[in-house]
Structure formats: C-alpha cells, structure tokens
Image (tube, rainbow, N blue to C red):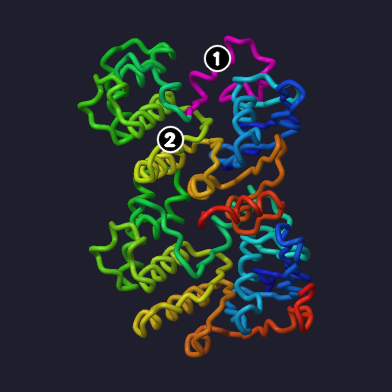
Amino acid sequence: MNPALRIRGLAKTFVLHNQGGAELPVLYGVDLDVHPGECVALDGPSGAGKSTLLKCIYANYRASSGAIVVNDGARDIDMAAASARELIALRRDTLGYVSQFLRTIPRVSALDIVAGPLLETGGGEAEVARDARREAEQLLLRLRIPIRLWSVPPATFSGGEQQRINIARGLIRAKPVLLLDEPTAALDADNRITVMAMINEARAAGTAIIGIFHDQRVRDAVATRVVDMAPFQRAQPATPTGA
Amino acid sequence: MSAQTPILRAMNLTMHYGARAAVDDASFDLWPGEVLAVVGESGSGKTTLLNCVSARLKPDAGSVEFLTRHEGVVNIYALSEAARRLYARTDWGYVHQNPAEGLRMNVSAGANVGERLMALGERHYGRIRGEAAQWLSRVEMEAGRIDDSPVTFSGGMRQRLQIARNLVTRPRLVFMDEPTSGLDVSVQAKLLDLLRNLSHQMQLAAIVVTHDLAVARLLAQRMLVMKSGRVVEEGLTDQVLDDPQHPYTQLLVSSVLQP
C-alpha cells in the first residue's frame, strides 16, 4: 500500500532577520513514511522539533528544503511546493490537525467551532448546517462537555474543555492524514480514555496518524510505531556562537 | 472554489504619485470565494493597490482582469466607463473605512440599502422595502430603525449598514478598506463575525486592506504583505503570521501582541 504521507529530506531552519540573521536549525534530513491505519508517535525531548515537524507537514511552517508528499486519494501532492489554493483544499479535505491550543473566535459557539469543518463543506445550506451541528453534538456528548456550554464561545473554558473542543473539531470530519499535537495533555483520566478510543477508531478506519504523546500510557495505547527525533537534528555547536 | 479561473487577476500594477511609486509591480490572483488580506504599515501602498484593482484609480502600468458572470474575463480598464460602473453597482462592493463615505447620510437606512436595488432596475416599493428590512436584520440592526437616517447611528451601526448596502445586490467580489479600524473592540468582534459568516454564506471573494493582523487572521485565508509599494511576502494567512520569511514581515509580526 502507498503511504498516505511521505517525507523526504525535510529540513527546517528559522532565519531571524531582526537578530542579525541568526539561524536556528531545527530539523534536518527527515525521512518518514506513514501508511493508512498507522499511528506514529514522535519521540524526543522538548526542543527536538516534534511540533515543528507537525507544523511543517500542515504547511503552517514553510519547509526550508525537502518534500512532504500527501496522497489525497487521487494523487500525490507536495505540501512544501503546493500553491496556497491547493493547501487550502488539502487542509479542508485531506489533512487534519489538532494543535495544542484552541484558537477561539469571538462570538462563535463551541458547537459551531466543532461543526466548522463540516459547515465549510456546504455553501451555507440549512440542511448541511443542521447535520453538521447534530454530529458536533454527538462528539461533545461523548467528550463530556456540559450541554449548557455548547452555545458559549469557548474563550472562557478551562484548558481541558478547550482541548476537548479542539479534538472534536479535529476529528469531526474523517481525513486521510491526521496530525495530533499532545491531544491529551490537559485531560482528566476519563476523558483521556475517551480520546484514546477516538484516536484508535480513526486509525482503524484507515487514517494515517502522526502525533506527539508525552504521556506513556497514551502512547502505548495508540501508537503502532515510535519514531526517535534524534537523527533529524544536525549536530549543534556546544557553545553559543558570537557570545 | 471549484472554478479554474481567478475572479480577479492583478498583473504588474504600478502607480506613481509624482516620482514615488505608491504601488510597484504588484501582481496577485484572487479566487472565487476567497478572502485575501493586504497588510502593511501606513504608506505601504495598500489602499492605492485596492483602488487600482477596484477600478477607482487607473494605474500607470499593468492590468486588472475580472471574471464576469456571463461574459468571460474582461480587462476592467479596457471597459467603457458605463460598463465599469455597472459592475461596480452590481457585481462588486466597496466598503470604506469611514462609513460616511459609502453611505448617503441624508436618506434613511432603508433607502441606503434599497438604492442599489433601484440602480438595477427594481421599482416595486414593497419588494425594495422588504429586501432592505431583511438585510438590516442580517446585519443585526433593529427593524424599527429602517426609516432613521444614518446620522443618528453609532459608528458600528453605520458600518453594518454600509455592509448591507453593498451586499444587497449579491456581489461576487467585495473590496474593504480597513472595515473595522474605526470601531471599538467589542463592536469590532461583532462586525468581524458578521463578515466571516456573510463571506462564507455568500461565497464572496474579498480583498480586505487592514493594518490589524488579528483581523487578517480571522477573516482571510490568504495574505499579501506590502512595504514601500511592493508585495514582499504572500502565503496562507497562518503561514505568513506564524513563520514570516521576509525581514519586514518578521518585524511586523513581532511588533504586535499575539495576532
């Protein structure tokens, strides 16, 4: 079977033009395949580039070099070379991403934030919107978000509640590739178990998952493979240069 | 989103004020249903660029192509003045920073909205009034204010009225120059939410000039960064804001609080 995600020679270096052009190399020589039905856990200490790798795959960060090839079901597309318009379509249909923190939107209810990825698919038709909200309700119920909060914008929610909103939004529409950045960090035991079950269901349905799971129990429960980040780092100078 | 032709294509636009280039060789495509933000500091050429692509200011060089509903792609500066005006009244909208510039302040709210319908040939008073009332409610204005003059409205209400006046003809392309910057923060949030919803429901293509990066993040899928009349960076909005490449964009992003 072809991988859903194929990364070759990916490098990412940040260049800080307003700090005298200082270069921060974060990733180097990343080669990685993720197949449908696999869940790859990225392993490494803070600063090893795990989140940066997910952000490069999502094209939130621009790769400095290399290829990030996603199969959208019909063809292979390189995220690192795609146009903005192609990236918008790929994010809508092919690539899901659950970030660490929820970006709330003033005046938009938790329910509509969760339903968002489904609402986007219709041109505002009432029927699409009703079905989308119904599915969002099911997810919010399953993730134990109290009904009284559904109509409230989540800006004032607790960290754990916001994280569950984010997960529900990330999972409401099945996509071939799913990126998860610490999806259970702020969750209590019951919700952690629910989220682990949801991740496993997505994987069993054929989603290719790549994620960061610091919690050993979560990693053991969801990952089919662990990838060490150490080989993806260029040797760093022992002391800061120019100090 | 499925269309294969951009709704607007700006090619090599240059506009001088005296010897200084306010816009210097700017090119971009805008796709149907897409919201594009143009950001940059005051004097970077954002508004001049907006005026050039909206047929309000003929550039010294370059061309602007518009995908019409029925007649294919036209070069807007090759059209007759009459044809250009017709598009401006029907298929395009223009939302000014100062609503007083986009409204007629001495006629009622309902007439402000109905006027663009009348320009399209609608003459039935009941239908015009009904449509105006419906649009006032879509921009969250009380029905009871339909006969009031915008002079009696707050800044936020005037801006919402200006938006209703622009959208009543169901344009496919809207130009917005700093639509929220004259408003206080709570009113801004309401207006942004309204613009987000309407642009999605109506599948509007829009160009939003703003100096506020948070507004760009909320409204636009794609972004252009301008400096000294040139487009120095472009990309997905979150990409440009989270991983800016150009020295000027890095400075811009690092200068604000959490866009």
Return the chain for callout 2.
B
Q: Does the magenta portion include B84?
A: yes
Q: Which residues are magenta?
A: B68-96
Q: Position of residue B82 (x, y in %)?
A: 57, 9
Q: Which residue in the protein does label 1 denote?
A: B85
State the residue lying farthest toward the left. B144
Give whichever of B184, B4 is nearer the camera: B184
Q: Are marks 2 and 1 in contact (CB under 8 Å)?
A: no
In the displayed structure, B240 sits above or below B137; it is below
Q: Amino acid at mark 1?
A: Arg
Asked if both marks, 2 and 1, belong to the same chain, the answer given is: yes
Q: Which mark is residue A211?
A: none
Q: Amino acid at mark 2?
A: Gly
The answer to whether residue A72 is seen in the rendering is no
Query: In terms of secondary structure, where does tag 2 sit?
Result: loop
Q: Residue at x 61, y 63 (%)?
A: A58
Q: Position of residue A178 (x, y in %)?
A: 55, 69
Q: Residue at x 70, y 55 (%)?
A: B245
Q: Does the magenta portion include B192?
A: no
The first of marks 2 and 1 along the sequence is 1
- Mark 2 → mark 1, Cα distance in angstroms: 28 Å
Residue A32: quarter of image: bottom right
Q: Residue at x 46, y 35 (%)?
A: B179
Callout 2 environment at 10 Å: few (<14), some (14 to 19), or many (20+)?
some
In the displayed structure, B92 sits above or below B200; it is above
Q: Which residue in the protein does label 2 denote?
A: B182
Q: Position of residue A161 (x, y in %)?
A: 35, 70
